[in-house]
Image: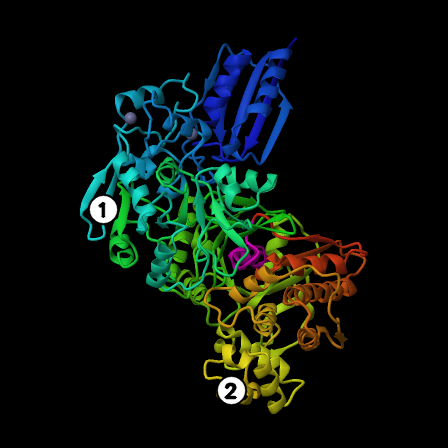
Amino acid sequence: MLKAVIIRASGIVQGVGFRPFIYRLAMRSGVKGYVKNIGGSAVEIHIEGREEDIDRFLKMFNDEKPSVACLEYVQVTEAEIEGYDAFKILESDPYSYRSSIIPPDFSICEDCLREVLDPSSRFYLYPFHSCAYCGPRYSIIEKIPYDRENTSMKDFHLCSKCLGEYHDPENTRRFHAQGISCSECGPKIMLYTRDYQPIYSGYDAIEYGGKLIDEGYIVAVKGIGGFHIAASATLDSALERLRKRKKRPSKPFAVMVLDIETASSLVKLNNEAIELLKSKERPIVLLDIREERRISSLVAPGLKQLGIFLPYTSLHYLLLKNTYDKFAVMTSGNPQGEPMCIDEECARNKLSDFVDYFLVHNRKIINRVDDSVVRFTRGRISILRRGRGYAPLWTTLPLKLKKPVIAFGAMLQSAGAVGFEDKVVLTQYIGDVDEYYCFRDLERYLRLLIENYRVDITSSIVTADMHPRYPSTLLAEEWARRYGTEIYKVQHHWAHIASAMAEHSLNEEVLGIAIDGVGYGLDKTIWGGEVLRVSYNDFERVGHLELQPMPGGDLAVRYPARMLAGILSKKFDQDELVTILAKLKITQKGFMQGEKELRLVLRQIQDSPKTSSTGRILDAASALLGVCFEKTYEGEPAVRLEAVSRKSNEILDVKINYSEKAVLDTTSIILNALDLLIDGVDVGEIAYMIQKTLGYGLGLIASRAAKRRHRYLLLSGGAAVNDYIVEGVEEAIKDTRLMLLLPRKFPVNDGGISLGQVVIAAHLHS
Ligand SMILES: [Zn+2]
Ligand SMILES: [Zn+2]
């Protein structure tokens, strides 16, 4: 019996060999009809033929569809038989590109890697090999659609062999693949000395680069989204030099490893971790370091986890293959606080202080894309940094936006966003926008999205954080003035929870726990341990952590012992406190000037700013337990506290004061911990109990605030990656109807804020 169906599928259907794939399926199953792009991010496939051929087509479609297509939906409907006599790829309508997804960068696929390692292949040892299913996209794209002339591959004209394969429909992976090249026609690689004298080119440059790493030299490597700094992960001398030169005393470095086997010799792997490491996104994944540490203790000082990732280009693979260890530190090539370099000029000017050699190529990086960073919290994925592989994919909202929305995010680890119709596109990870070059990048990448998705700024609305001094807020205000648009400033923690709601396609009132370091509150104090009742239209603060003084303001963020002194001063007088802290050796380690400074700090308490921040309580705990006395990178005291934790069956006293709002008494948590410490209880167990108690207390407040209509509790904010806090929340709500949800696709930290800002601003506007 003859039959016809129409398949509509949406996702990344351009530049990933999707239409050629459909064409081949049609040939194999013998059906007739057409495939064409509709609207840029979707295809329409009409097939007709014998019923069994149609079924075969559909089965093959299901089983073999390229994973890089990231299909969002597939819809199959019966259709009229039109009487086609062949199967054709129809030209796409040139005006239908508006909502074409800008594709992210994909790691090299297994087929390409096999060719790179095959001496009989013409791609043998070629560092830039890619095909329809793999290779850079976003990092080399100037504008959509993703066609070669719109990317930095336009500088490289296909040689006759490549051109032949490009036009050959039988060539599965290279037919109409926009990014292909070979050693004859593609980018070239060079090795330079520190003063930029060329020494090797081609594969020799890579081979020698690997040797240099073995010998303890530091090599800047131009990859696909920017520069890395590569160094041996086993030589203390190399890492000492790198840390000193980069002024980065203890922030952990990521390690790139040749393959899963090598990875398993460094960290503990399970199936989820392996799948994530091998995924086309190839993020850095934080995993537990094996007891028999093969890496230098200078790679991730004081931490039990290491960030590892697999090579995502042929270049990286070949470089590691030429090292003795088969793994190496690969950290962002940036001067402290600034964005990673993407061109040679930046590298020469800004990296030559840290590196000894440069391994570079002549393909332009158009867009900076940092490596993504992912960890597991309670066994499930949490995104810490959303860059290469994930950005700038869009998300589909559970609602339609009446006007486009441009969101400027917050301040640290920030990303902006553009919303239109039912889509929100976040920029890649931008960085801390209090730094000038990151700030500039925020505007640049917002404009890139605005131009590519043809958003009219003057008919948009603009949204930013409520914090009056965030550079991103000031920029949003400037845009609002310049383009005459309305501006909505959104409370930080409300945006956190709304972001998680949007990701989970919720459009109903929920309860939220937002826990982080800093967010500007409605009452102008610093919030950061908040229980909220949230919808997109409105929110209510139903509870929070007790307000604690931050003696010396920002100094209390840098030196956690100041927070501890502030909290303990609620119970002890000055002399008692001086005695206790001296006995615990905190006075000497936590205050640069010792007792003199401590007494000064105690006098500052009365006039100091107050905060309900979760981060600051974790800081105080970290100082109390002697884990960390100076924060040299974002979240350090909290990360190290989590690292020393050891499971216990107990938690600490949970005191909640219910008056107008529920307030979790954090002073009693710290005092309780102090007693245990004096009693000689294991530091790791106390650390665990503090974190779990915080989560438990916040969870109790949320469950008390829950009404019958509330089905979900959303947990977000930078501290929502903490295993033990999340465990505490889970335990507190286990007998309620509330279902706990955390962000999975967007960062829990401020990198996810702009998504929440978009949905809230859209609601405030209407
Ligand atoms: Zn490939
Ligand atoms: Zn070629």
Q: Position of residue 624 (x, y in %)?
A: 60, 74
Amino acid type at image mark 1? Tyr
Q: How many marks?
A: 2
Q: Which residue is mark 2?
A: 595
In the rendered image, the vertical position of residue 304 relative to residue 323, given as above or below? below
Q: Secondary structure at mark 1?
A: strand
Q: Please rate how many residues cluster around mark 2, counting C-alpha atoms within 10 Å: few if below 14, some from 14 to 19, many from 20.
A: some
| Residue 424 in sight here | yes
In the rendered image, the quadrant that contains the N terminus is top right
Q: Is residue 761 magenta?
A: yes
Where does the image place residue 309, in percent across and percent down from the top left? Answer: 47, 44
Q: Residue at x 25, y 57 (%)?
A: 349
Give how far across and how far down residue 209 sits, in percent: 29, 43
For residue 621, side relative to residue 157 (left or right): right
Comparing marks 2 and 1, which lies closer to the viewer? 2
Q: Is 759 situated above or below 695? A: above
| Amino acid type, mark 2 | Glu
Instruction: Mark 2 and mark 1 in contact? Answer it, CB < 8 Å.
Output: no
Disc 2 to disc 1, C-alpha distance? 52 Å
Secondary structure, magenta segment, majority class: helix
Q: Which residue is mark 1?
A: 192
User: Which badge, 2 or 1, is on the more N-terminal residue?
Assistant: 1
Q: Quadrant of residue 138?
A: top left
**Start and end of the magenta stretch?**
746-766
Magenta segment includes 559: no
Q: Which quarter shows the C terminus?
A: bottom right
Rendering coords of residue 115 (x, y %) = 39, 25
- Nearest the camera: 342 or 4? 342
Which residue is at a point 28% across and 44% down the rendered structure image?
360
